[in-house]
Image: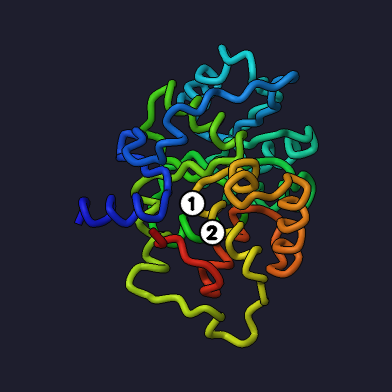
Amino acid sequence: MAHFLQHLVRKAGWKLLDIAGKQTAMSEAETDRPTPVSAMPARVIVVEDDERLRSYALGALAGAQDIAVVGDAGSLAAGLPLVDLQPDLALLDLGLPDGSGQTIIQAIRERVPGCRVLVFTVFEDRASVLGTLKAGADGYILKDTSVEQLLGHVRATLAGETPISARAASHLLSLVRDEPVAPEPADPAAPHLSPRERELLEYLARGLSRKEAARVMNLSPYTVAEYMQAIYRKLQVKSRGEAVFEAIQARLIRIDRE
């Protein structure tokens, strides 16, 4: 079963992480991708109720010159105000003592739509994974990961990639495994995406950044941005993660093409 899952993930192009958070499948182009350089450090908030794990995450990010932690919290109540700091990325736990981290994701999508969200959790059940991606998460990793890998996942998420653990990926792939996708959606009520919009969304679902998708599709970044605005509007979503989730659910795209 493990070999079969790895085969499916390699075909789909997802970044597959093993139980230790180690990447085991990725495209050749991603292997040598340099760390993105930015004039200003990326603003990051961390919400984790376990003080030891929060210190662990803060320590992993502390030495990175391209990242600035602008706030951290250990509860939903304390984490929600951090959204007003206009972060570039939120590293979130799901199981907070006074509620779910999904509430913070929803607040981010409403108030800081450009903020990336990387979920850092112990939950790996289907409902948590799919619910969190639908809420707008851009990546989903489990807490059994090294300092170097955690920093790498944060940077990858900031760069537009979608880190996802193997166990989380298995739930997502179960939505499309053994279910052929018709050229047009089976549900007549599903939103209509143009062929180019579908193609772009499939590339993004496989982990390509917008810049990489633009290069592959021979489009300008401005055209890709226009396509993304149209996709978000048609699917009534506010993030890439939501768009991919809704498109897969509606059978608008497939990620198992060769």
Left or right: 4 as drawn, with respect to 204: left
Q: Quadrant of residue 27?
A: top left
Residue in the picture at 46% in, 24% down: 52
Q: Which mark is residue 124?
A: none
Q: Quadrant of residue 72?
A: top right
Q: Which mark is residue 206?
A: 1
Residue 160: x %, y % from top left:
60, 40
Give the amino acid type for the residue marked by disc 2 in the picture. Glu
Left or right: 178 as drawn, with respect to 140: left
- Quadrant location, the C terminus: bottom left
How crowded pointer 2 is (Cα within 10 Å; few <14, some 14-19, many 20+) is rated as many
Q: Is residue 97 visible?
A: no
Residue 159: x %, y % from top left:
60, 34
Residue nearest the observer in this picture, 20 or 189: 189
Residue in the picture at 70% in, 20% down: 41
Residue nearest the observer in this picture, 69 or 225: 225
Extreme-front residue of the structure? 218
Q: Quadrant of residue 79?
A: top right
Residue 217: x %, y % from top left:
61, 52
- Quadrant location, the N terminus: bottom left
Q: Is residue 201 visible?
A: yes
Residue in the picture at 39% in, 76% down: 180
Residue in the picture at 55% in, 41% down: 161
Give the amino acid type for the residue marked by disc 1 in the picture. Arg
220 vs 48: above or below? below
Q: Which residue was labeled with disc 2? A: 202
Residue nearest the observer in this picture, 95 or 129: 129
Extreme-bottom residue of the structure? 188
Left or right: 175 as drawn, with respect to 61: left
| Tags 1 and 2 touching, CB below 8 Å | yes
Looking at the image, what colour scheme do you see?
A: rainbow
